[in-house]
Amino acid sequence: MQDSPAWIVSKANQYARDHGKTPFSVYQGQWSLMQRSFERDIIPMARAEGKKLFGPIRFNNFQTCIAGLALTPWGVLSEGRLRTDAEDKMRRETGELGRTYRGQTWERSEEEKKMSAALEVVAEEVGATSIQAGAYFCQLILNSE
Amino acid sequence: MTVCPFAVAIAYLLHKATHVFPVVGGRKVEHLLANIDALNISLTRKQIAYLESVNPFDPGFPSTQFVCHVFCCAFHYVNVTFCIGRWDDTYSCDANCRKDRSVASPPAHHTVSTIDLSRSMRNIKYK
């Protein structure tokens, strides 16, 4: 199911259950750090769809009971507009620029620039901690031997 | 290890909910490799809170209402009591992130399918 309101997915799934058909297993929609309205209704719906309100779990509804709706977000990098300043500069110099479709510019907005900078900060932090975690893991293996 | 900022953006989504399979459209091999890196990243709650604070998001009505929270909790209580569920699977947006794993354990080097499998196995609780 793609790009539709949460209540439509819920109703369709209920229709499917009532008529012995298979409910939806995946919801696809736009979700990224720049576009978080997905978190309002879609995610709670996806979680709730996997749960039965009453009654024991049976094997024939095992999957639908536990898994819930999987999510396949699109536009996760704000359609290519979450990028570093360095890459922006490189694209200008090489004349590569970026994709312009559906009337959108390839230039980043102020918010996207701010978010890109924040992502770079976190990426640096994560890079440092991964090395530590890797070291910790090595230590564990060595100790167990 | 250098981590690409794109990978962090993807890892953020993987932390916010279970069973997330981002659709990515890279045009270069480097994009693909950077995107795969996202599977190895574990973010702390602090980092997630920082990313969310850059562009504040207002969930709006009715998510901001106390009554909505009560209803969600009641619904969840019923689920946990009579069916399957976990208490830390709360319905509020900000509590959806996973527990801070980076301190206790190293980042898991899994493929997408095994991550998915281990997450669903963790969710199983028989009543």
Image (cartoon, coloured by chain):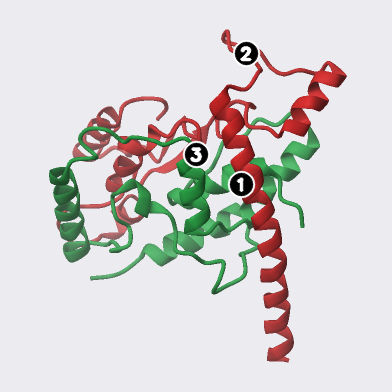
- The reply, left or right, for residue A86 in relation to residue B38 is right
Q: Quadrant of the N terminus of chain A?
A: top left
| Residue A77 seen in the figure | no
Q: Quadrant of the C terminus of chain A?
A: bottom right
- Disc 3, SS: helix
Residue at mark 1 to residue at mark 2: CA–CA distance: 24 Å
Q: Give the residue at x 29% y 44%.
A: A49
Q: Tell if the residue under mark 1 belongs to the same chain as the one under mark 3.
A: yes
The one nearer the camera, A48 or B9, is B9
The one nearer the camera, B123 or A61, is B123
Chain B: colour as depicted: green
Chain A: colour as depicted: red
- The reply, left or right, for residue B9 in relation to residue A97 is left
- Packing grade of label 3 (10 A; few <14, some 14-19, many >=20) is some
Indicate the quadrant where residue A23 lies: top left
Is the C-beta separation of discs 1 and 2 under 8 Å?
no
| Residue A109 seen in the figure | yes
Residue at mark 2 to residue at mark 3: CA–CA distance: 22 Å
Q: Give the residue at x 71% y 45%.
A: B4
Point out residue A111 in the picture as x, y percentages from the top left corner: 54, 28
- Hey, what amino acid is under mark 2? Thr
Point out residue A92 in the picture as x, y percentages from the top left corner: 80, 19
Query: Height in image: A137 above or below B81?
Result: below
Q: From the image, tell me which residue sits under label 2.
A: A105
- Hey, what amino acid is under mark 3? Val
- Disc 1, SS: helix
Q: From the image, tell me which residue sits under label 3.
A: B54
Q: From the image, tell me which residue sits under label 1.
A: B8
Query: Height in image: B36 above or below B108?
Result: above
Tell which subunit mark 1 falls on: B
